[in-house]
């Protein structure tokens, strides 16, 4: 066991003979090395970071100055007394070193004679699961560590399950800290049997088990004399020989999500992207999805000259024989074997935000180079990672794993995640904060978009509006209960009507009693209420109308959803800004009194939030402006902004 | 069937190109930070490959300190010409007015010219995504950073609250004023960079190769006397030594190594056989205890 630097210095600085004698030969070998990406994961303190520190150290990736720093840091911040704490080589953030834990993934690199390795050291704490998932998503292999004294724990199960979900098919079970259980074969066998029972239950059929000590180095780079009963390879020897990803991808049909259209001048139009699967060469027939148009590849263009062929994993630019419509978000595919297109899916989701999933709310969904607006329905179930039971759930909390239906506003070109990480893996982005809140894996489509035939309407939206001689719009009034939304909206409608405009007012009275009578006042119902009103308003603008809506619509995300349904400029948010005390004082319908006395729940402003618009097109301060003046100003603003329709 | 698999350099190259194209497709105003070092050289080469036959559709930004090696300014101007890209040079006017320099002002020099200068330049032009050539193998807090590294409106980095980053799906969305630093060569090592330069004939500053150069030894570092602004201390006399540099920054802050490596394979050979890390020649990492770089990045250093 290395207690000081000098004990091991000889080993570390033993120079590689080939480098010293024949650098060209060395470079030639190095140039043809393959790359394996792997992670270390498992429960808190099982020794993940220590193992990586050890791998770096033993593969001579640590320089003298770093080693000197490690030695002094180990004494100051280490968890191993005076001995070297290898975890400090990897736990690079101040907060991690202070607490002796890993918070975020560290990416480290080392080479052996056979391969280059990128290893992502994942945090064990449940709190940081999203960081573990980040590391695991790009891995070809996972080393799952177990503390030999503790055996299989909840986090061992959670991480194994996540690795399996993310499609990592090479699993190594490293039973660590064997030095603390006297290198007992019985203990090792017991843990492996335990793990096997669990692994089989989640679909992990094979894994490779090794007894190791990251701290002392047993079976890490070389077989250990302390475990004569173990005859398998060392960890490194195993990592050097497992197959790397890529072969599977290459064997499948050609797919390339179009990232960017390269158009330096009128004579060149190329489509750039990373090949997700298969290979392509000039002369190949390809199909553009979702449009379905076909063409032929003419060239594969690079700075160093045209290529005869390009393979999965390469980032290329190719040209087509025909001037067909193709842009970012489209997928180029082998003409005879195109992927599916759909807009409703079943997906497994991992939730990554402190704020739970809101079913029905619109999020951005990014898959490959496609970004669409999507909603998640109430989950079918969440998984209890300890028992693998399916539990009923209304939402997904931070770190929950569940299955739910996902509905997109536009058709997506996709493949099941098990067949393609690129066309099956997606992230969900909050539309207001822009945070990445969830990740998902598409399983299958619930309805093929090909079957939905959009009626090609000859009487267009434009034609409807032209006949009415007006520019359609939605005047979206929002504000607290009793702020004066309906009063002002009514005035505006009267004035527009007097000017010969075709309008329609949607408010609680005409919507709640019919279209939305099945909805209550929970957050989910309020969201659905607004979604339906938004869709109806949109149809009415398609019919050429100027629509006025008067709903509290307390959530920013839903108002933004409606905005995104409409063409630019047609959504006019009118914020009736009345302080709560004024609205409460008026209390026309006596609702505030009921809410205050607890007879009414989920009342906006009292026990349910109102999210003020950040940049409303129009804001009415009811303390300063009379309803009459406000209505006049809104009409002017709206009419004034309109261009005559030709 | 024996399927061909890509080598590690091919995979790294494809990853970097993919990242650059994502940024161009999703950001409003991208820019490439160009420091003229070997990592910048590789980044620029990758950008030319990513967008060929178009020139890379963003400008190069050099946040200058006025204290770079002469040879760096020469290569910078040449590469801008050859790549057909616009070159923006920014020098912090306040640092200039106050005559901030590495000899008299120590840490303040880096802070004002580089950290402040960078923030000012990004704000001035309204860039919302900036490519940087940092690598994860350089330093322990870099090893923790995402490829798309989100910055607040005041350019701060929050290492404990980074966005999840799955597969090769990057979330480039941000609110007004916020920005993203993007590191396309995050997963490259120093050796990968050298080998790529070797295989692709990427032009680099000649200072990376050994030559006889005027030097003085000071505070355990071998410094090159690049121009006559170098104040010699009593008893100091420039001595010609065969030296080269592993990284390039401001010449008064960058330590050289004694070397005879005149070709790339020789440089690589020395790199592989050396026992000290690349950043050892840099003064910046030694500030603020063990967390020097992390603290600097929270303040807006690249
Ligand atoms: N005796 C012994 N101790 C070990 C071994 N591996 C790790 N340790 C110690 O176990 C403790 C936790 O190690 P870490 O490497 O930080 O654990 P981790 O799994 O990375 O922890 P998190 O990332 O925070 O989940 C440290 O004190 C290590 O020195 C081992 O093989 N033998
Ligand atoms: Mg750890």
Image: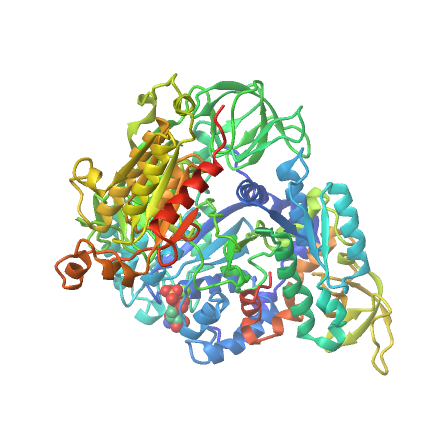
| Pick the front one: A480 or A92 | A480
- Residue B149: percent from left, percent from top: 51, 55
* Residue that extends furthest to the left in the rendered view of this protein: A599
| Pick the front one: B153 or A556 | A556
Q: Quadrant of residue A206?
A: top left
Ligand 2's quadrant: bottom left
Q: Is residue A237 above or below residue A243?
A: below
Task: Tell me: A482 left or right of B141.
Answer: left
* Residue that extends furthest to the bottom in the rendered view of this protein: B234
- Residue A538: percent from left, percent from top: 34, 33
Q: Is residue B269 above or below residue A641?
A: below
Task: Tell me: B196 left or right of A523.
Answer: right
Looking at the picture, the colour scheme in use is: rainbow
What residue do we see at 73% from left, 40% from top?
B84
Whether residue A104 is visible: yes
Q: Is residue A64 above or below residue A374?
A: below
Whether residue B2 is visible: no
What residue do we see at 75% from left, 57% from top?
B208
- Residue A267: percent from left, percent from top: 67, 23
Q: Is residue A3 above or below residue A634?
A: below
Q: Number of numbered discs present? A: 0
| Pick the front one: A456 or A641 | A641
Q: Which quadrant: the C terminus of chain B?
A: bottom right
- Residue A536: percent from left, percent from top: 29, 33
Q: Quadrant of residue B50?
A: top right
């Amino acid at each position: 066991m290395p207690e000081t630097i000098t004990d091991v210095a000889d080993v570390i600085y033993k120079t590689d003979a080939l480098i010293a004698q024949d650098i060209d030969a060395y470079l030639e070998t190095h140039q043809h090395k393959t790359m394996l990406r792997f992670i270390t994961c498992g429960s808190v303190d099982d020794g993940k970071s220590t193992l990586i520190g050890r791998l770096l150290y033993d593969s001579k990736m640590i320089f003298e100055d770093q080693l000197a720093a490690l030695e002094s840091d180990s004494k100051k911040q280490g968890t191993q007394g005076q001995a070297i704490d290898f975890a400090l080589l990897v736990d690079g953030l101040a907060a991690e070193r202070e607490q002796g834990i890993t918070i975020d993934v560290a990416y480290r690199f080392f080479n052996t004679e056979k391969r280059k390795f990128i290893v992502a050291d994942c945090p064990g704490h449940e709190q940081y699961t999203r960081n573990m998932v980040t590391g695991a998503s790009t891995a070809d292999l996972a080393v799952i560590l177990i503390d030999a004294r503790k055996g299989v724990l909840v986090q061992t199960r959670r991480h194994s399950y996540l690795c399996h979900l993310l499609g990592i098919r090479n699993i190594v079970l490293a039973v660590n800290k064997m030095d603390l259980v006297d290198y007992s074969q019985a203990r090792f066998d017991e843990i492996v049997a335990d793990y096997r029972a669990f692994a089989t239950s989640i679909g992990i059929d094979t894994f490779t088990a090794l007894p190791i000590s990251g701290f002392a180095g047993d079976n890490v780079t070389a077989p250990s004399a302390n475990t004569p009963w173990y005859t398998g390879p060392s960890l490194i020897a195993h990592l050097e020989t497992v197959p790397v990803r890529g072969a599977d991808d290459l064997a499948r049909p050609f797919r390339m999500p179009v990232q960017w259209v390269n158009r330096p001048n009128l004579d060149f139009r190329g489509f750039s992207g990373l090949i997700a699967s298969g290979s392509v060469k000039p002369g190949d027939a390809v199909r553009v999805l979702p449009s379905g148009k076909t063409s032929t590849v003419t060239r594969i263009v690079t700075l160093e000259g045209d290529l005869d062929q390009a393979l999965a994993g390469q980032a290329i630019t190719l040209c087509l024989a025909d001037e067909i419509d193709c842009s970012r978000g489209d997928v180029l595919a082998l003409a005879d074997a195109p992927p599916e297109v759909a807009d409703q899916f079943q997906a497994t989701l991992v939730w990554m935000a402190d704020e739970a999933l809101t079913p029905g709310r619109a999020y951005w969904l990014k898959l490959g180079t496609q970004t669409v607006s999507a909603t998640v329905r109430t989950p079918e179930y969440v998984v209890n990672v300890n028992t693998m039971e399916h539990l009923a759930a209304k939402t997904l909390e931070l770190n929950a794993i569940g299955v739910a239906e996902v509905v997109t506003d536009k058709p997506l070109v996709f493949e099941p995640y098990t067949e393609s990480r690129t066309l099956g893996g997606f992230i969900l982005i909050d539309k207001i904060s822009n945070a990445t809140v969830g990740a998902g894996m598409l399983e299958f489509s619930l309805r093929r978009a090909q079957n939905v035939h959009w009626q090609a309407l000859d009487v267009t939206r434009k034609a409807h509006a032209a006949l009415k001689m007006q520019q359609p719009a939605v005047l979206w009034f929002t504000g607290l209960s009793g702020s004066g939304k309906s009063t002002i909206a009514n005035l505006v409608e009267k004035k527009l009507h007097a000017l010969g405009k075709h309008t329609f007012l949607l408010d609680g009275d005409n919507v709640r009693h019919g279209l939305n009578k099945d909805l209550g006042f929970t957050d989910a119902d309020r969201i659905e209420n607004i979604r339906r009103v938004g869709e109806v308003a949109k149809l009415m603008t398609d019919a050429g109308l100027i629509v006025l809506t008067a709903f509290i619509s307390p959530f920013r995300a839903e108002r933004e959803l409606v905005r995104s349904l409409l063409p630019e400029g047609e959504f006019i948010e009118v914020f009736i800004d009345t302080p709560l005390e004024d609205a409460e004082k008026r209390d026309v319908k006596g609702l505030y009194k009921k809410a205050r006395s607890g007879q009414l729940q989920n009342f906006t402003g009292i026990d349910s939030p109102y999210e003020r618009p950040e940049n409303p097109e129009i804001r009415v301060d009811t303390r300063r402006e009379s309803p009459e003046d406000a209505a006049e100003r809104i009409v002017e603003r709206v009419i004034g902004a309109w261009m005559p329709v030709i | 069937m024996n399927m061909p698999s890509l080598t590690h350099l091919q995979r790294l190259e494809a990853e970097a190109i993919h990242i650059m194209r994502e940024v161009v497709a999703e950001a409003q105003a991208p820019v490439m930070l160009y420091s003229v070092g070997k990592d910048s050289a590789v980044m620029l080469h990758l950008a030319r490959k990513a967008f060929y036959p178009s020139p890379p559709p963003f400008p190069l930004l050099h946040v200058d300190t006025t204290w770079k090696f002469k040879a760096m300014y020469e290569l910078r101007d040449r590469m801008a010409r050859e790549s057909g890209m616009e070159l923006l040079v920014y020098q912090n006017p306040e640092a200039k007015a106050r005559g901030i320099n590495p000899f008299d002002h120590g840490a303040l020099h880096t802070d004002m010219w580089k950290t402040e200068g960078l923030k000012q330049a990004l704000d001035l032009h309204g860039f919302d995504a900036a490519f940087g050539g940092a690598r994860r193998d350089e330093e322990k807090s870099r090893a923790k950073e995402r490829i798309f590294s989100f910055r607040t409106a005041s350019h701060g980095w929050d290492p404990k609250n980074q966005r999840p980053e799955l597969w090769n799906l990057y979330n480039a969305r941000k609110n007004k004023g916020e920005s993203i630093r993007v590191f396309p060569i995050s997963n490259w090592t120093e050796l990968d960079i050298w080998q790529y330069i070797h295989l692709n004939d990427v032009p680099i500053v000649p200072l990376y190769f050994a030559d006889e150069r005027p030097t003085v030894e000071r505070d355990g570092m071998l410094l090159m006397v690049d121009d006559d602004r170098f104040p010699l201390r009593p008893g100091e006399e420039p001595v010609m030594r065969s030296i080269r540099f592993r990284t390039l920054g401001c010449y008064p802050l960058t330590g050289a190594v004694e070397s005879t490596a005149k070709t790339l394979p020789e440089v690589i050979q020395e790199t592989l056989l050396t026992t000290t890390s690349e950043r050892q020649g840099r003064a910046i990492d030694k500030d603020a205890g063990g967390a020097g770089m992390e603290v600097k990045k929270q303040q807006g250093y690249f």
